[in-house]
Image (cartoon, rainbow, N blue to C red):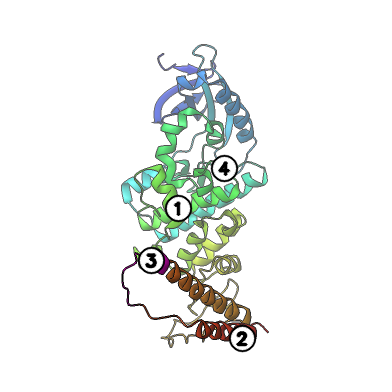
Amino acid sequence: MSTPSAVANRYRLDDRLGAGGMSTVFLALDTVLERQVAVKLLAEHLAEDESFVARFRREALSAARLQHPNVVQVFDSGQDPDSSRHYIVMEFVNGPSCADLLRDQETLGVEHTTDIVRGACNGLDYAHRQGVVHRDVKPGNLLISSESGNLKLADFGIAKAAEQTRITQVGSVLGTAAYLSPEQARGEEAGPASDIYSLGVCAYQFLAGRLPHEYGSLTELALKQQSDQVRPITDYRSDVPPELDRAILVCLETDPAARYGSALELGEAMSAGLHGQVTQATQMLEQQAGTGSQTAATRALGTERAAPPTAAPPPRRAPAPAPSKSRRGLAVLLALLVIGAGVVAALLVLQSSPPEPVDVQTIDAQDFSEQIDGLRELIEQNTE
């Protein structure tokens, strides 16, 4: 079926803005209000999946309730009576996506990245408080208005509608897997912490020019998310403040509970990190995860900024704690069992060996009994 020239007898489709496995986006004219809009036409094969269509309608309604300066507004949705194509009418953002910027520049400036992430945090925090999770935060869904410079989050609800369909198992997920949180990769329900993880991946890529985990398959990515430690961004760029690096790394923790409790906390941490400060939330989460910085060059947000760090003497190793009496007794008991097992094994070998002359030292039963009594006494002394 060819693409219609108009939708719902109201939206005239003009230029194509982009296309993906699930939809095609057009610049269109709302002939009633005489304004430019963006119209997303869902792929024709999706209309065959009734469960998808039902989820899509529910999520489109949820997205339409979101009205925030950092969220792309959804104006209308439905099914075109002439072409039977399902559509969404959205606010048109005249400007590039962050995916466009990465293709042109490979990396973004430190301040520019901070501004983008803070804008996204504002939009996500608003949506989360409305009970809406984005589920598909990625550079292509972060739009920057050329007129105002504001960051706009696009495509709320589409990822939710696409969950549990056969379509995304081989299509869209492969393209956006790098931004999925570990819990999403495991097939678990996404929550606000999942969006924070995805936004952290975006921030990492904007600054480092690469993803936190390079992968060749979804299985490899899932394994790396669980086992590999993410390299600091400062390994790739010296102009990134370490404090900003730390804020981003907190977003990439495998455990959702180890990430920021809200998108606003992340936004505050990004602002603080840009100025060489660390928020209390970042410090607390680092301590819980055991990744806190040992340098004295950073202080919590709201405190005086520290002077450049001086060379510190190497930390002294604390003496290893002496084992408890119960553990010493257990160790001795294990030693006794090993010795006894060895003796029994030796006797069995002697009994089962062929009747050939073997030079074996005779075992004195009295000596062995005395050794057992000595070990028993040692156990009693260490378990009192």
N-terminal label among 1 and 2: 1
Q: Nearer the viewer, residue 379 or 246?
A: 379
Q: CA distance from mark 4 to mark 2?
A: 56 Å
Q: Amino acid at mark 4?
A: Glu
> Going by the image, does 241 lie left or right of 81?
left
Crowd class of label 2 (few under 14; some 14 to 19; many from 20; radius 10 Å): few
Q: Residue beneath label 3, please?
A: 234
Q: Amino acid at mark 1?
A: Gln
* Residue 246 in view of the camera: yes
Question: Disc 1 vs disc 2: Cβ atoms closer than 8 Å?
Answer: no
Residue drawn at (40%, 67%) of the image: 349
N-terminal label among 4 and 3: 4
Query: Where residue 154 sits: x, y (%)?
Result: 51, 39
Question: Disc 4 vs disc 2: Cβ atoms closer than 8 Å?
Answer: no
Q: CA distance from mark 1 to mark 3?
A: 20 Å
Above or below, comparing residue 37 to residue 356 in the picture:
above
Q: Residue beneath label 4, please?
A: 188
